[in-house]
Every structure is written in C-alpha cells, then in structure tokens.
Amino acid sequence: MEQGSQLADRIFTVGSDEDFESLALEVFRFQYSNNAVYREFCQQVMCRSGDVDCLEDIPFLPIEVFKHREVTSFDGPAKQVFTSSGTTGSVLSRHYIADVSVAERSFRECFRLFYGDPSRYCILALLPGYLEREGSSLVYMARLLAEESRHPYSGFYLDDMDALAERMKVLMERGERILLLGVSFALLELTERYPMKLRNAIVMETGGMKGRRREMVREELHQLLCDAFGQDRIHSEYGMTELLSQAYSRGDGLFSSPPWMRILIRDGNDPAEIIGSTRGGGISVIDLANVHSCSFIATQDLGRISSESYFEVAGRFDHSDVRGCNLLV
C-alpha cells in the first residue's frame, strides 16, 4: 500500500491540466498493476498498460462492477466499507476504503474549495433513508462536516422536523448562516409541513426520491424549493458511493469538480470513445482520491460538458447495466 499512499499524498496538490494528466497516468499504471478486477477489465477490452499515453486512452470501469466484485488496489482488510442504497433484495455497491484519512481529506477539501470552512455555517442534515442504514458515504461526509462546523445545532434531523424548524427560526433571528443539506423528498416534506422563507441560508439537495415521491426533473424540483424557501437558487451535490470526491452546483444545474476530479463524456453506444463538449453522452469520472480503489469509473448518468469549468447531469441510461459490465459479472 506504500506506493498508493505516496500517490495519495500528491493528489490534493494537483494544479495544472498537465499535472492532472501526469498523475492520472501514474494512478492508472498503479491500479493496473495492483487492482486485479480493473486489470481484468482492461484486458477484456484489449487494453494493456503500455497502450495508454493520455487520458482518453484510459478504460473506464463500469460502475455496476462495484455491485459484484471487490474493486481494490490494496491488500489486507478495509478500514471502512461504503455501501449504496437500494430496494429490498437488490444488490448493493460496496466501496472498500483502505485509508479513511484520504476519504476524509477529500470530503473536507471539496467542501472548503466551494463553500469555505465548515465553521462558517450551522450545518443541518436532513437525510432520512440514508441515516437509517449502515455504510452511507453521504452520512459519513455530512457527519464530518457537521462536526467541523462546531455549531451546537449542527447535526442530523431524522424525523424531528419540529426541532429542525424551530432551530432554523432561532438561527435566522440570530443572523447565523445556515446550510440545509437534504435529500429531495425530505426537503419537499419540510416545505409542506413548515413553510418558511429562509434568510442567510444555503439549501442543498443531494438528489434521491428513493420511491418516496413522484420523480421529477431537477428544474421542477428546484423551482418548488425556491418558491417554498424564498431562495433564488438551490445548490446541489453530485457524488456517489463509488467515489470519494464530490462536485457541487451553486444553482442552474451547473456542477464544478475539484482539481483532482475530472468529468469526461463518452459516446452512449461506444464506451471507449470520449466525445467533445458539445454533445451529450455518458458521464465518466476520474477521481484521483480513489487511488486505493479505481479512479476511472463509467457511471450510469447522462450529461454534457457545458463549459471549460462546468458540466450538467441530464438523467440516467434507461438500461440497468452500463455497457461492458457483463464482461466481469
């Protein structure tokens, strides 16, 4: 694990595009050598380590593989296992963490990059469905940020919306900054039970109706939340069990990622082809913080690059598995 730890020490100092590509290629070669599942996938798609000279040459592992195989680039037991949410009887993704300090640093640094020090906010987490199960990376991140905020009101509010509403009123009266982080259905329920116009607040949704309400497009959801909370925009977080880094949106559905994370768009019919910014396709993610797992992941999300600094998430593929996953299952 020593080589992986040495790479991890360099991840959060990435500066230029050249730095990112150079380190990404190092991580690729490390994972090709040390991650049996990823190496098997690369060989199945006829890619050898020596064939890769640029980012576009790197194969992206279908995210569905995390449901069926242990995707690790380290030996020995995991220090933490993050698991995805799912319906009863469904197969869950598992992300095996070799070094929790890398995960925690990524969570902290991502947040600070976009929002500053957590101590600037009272962080109120409304995450029913996630809090009730073991292994949620979102809960892990929210708990870490709430602790770092050091505010006595920061923390989780599962079903006690009475207390949440009262505390938001107190915080507004004091003029303190609020960060309300919640899953979509819970935020909507809060607006229905306790409609109030928030001041000095950021409302951030993390997605997820989880079968609790009618699915709706982001624009509709955000408009409902804006009207109810008296906000001109709703923020969003884009992350997943299989990643250790997050992208954030300050509104309008435009996401930006940290320097050690990169979004590429692949052709929907040819996963090996990376396409330009003007076309939509499948979202592939390079997350260098995933150095002890796999940093090159083909997600089930659809999107496009909207500018040099931003990307949009448009929806999901309508088939259950990302193309290529069956090679390893």
Image: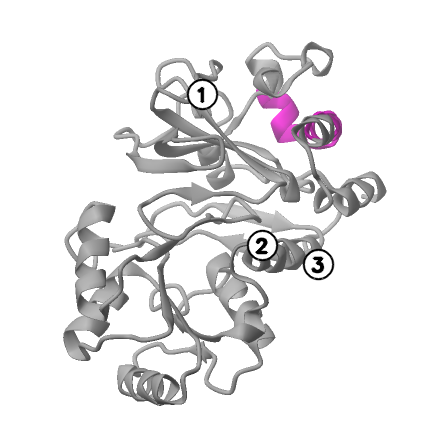
x 66%, y 57%: residue: 105
According to the picture, the residue beneath numbered tag 2 turns out to be: 113
Left or right relative to 317: residue 16: right
Magenta stretch, residue numbers: 24-41
The reply to whether the C-beta atoms of the residues labelled 1 and 3 are less than 8 Å apart is: no
Amino acid under disc 2: Leu
Mark 3 or 2, which is nearer the eye?
2
- The first of marks 1 and 2 along the sequence is 2
According to the picture, the residue beneath numbered tag 3 turns out to be: 101
Mark 1 or 2, which is nearer the eye?
2
Amino acid under disc 3: Ser
Mark 1 or 3, which is nearer the eye?
3
Residue 78's spot in the image, x, y percent?
68, 53
Q: CA distance from mark 1 to mark 2?
A: 34 Å
Q: Indicate the secondary structure of the residue bearing disc 2.
A: helix
Q: CA distance from mark 1 to mark 3?
A: 32 Å
- Residue 319 picture quarter: top left
Residue 214's spot in the image, x, y percent?
14, 53
Q: Which mark is residue 324?
A: 1
x 61%, y 35%: residue: 295
Q: CA distance from mark 3 to mark 2?
A: 18 Å
- The first of marks 1 and 3 along the sequence is 3
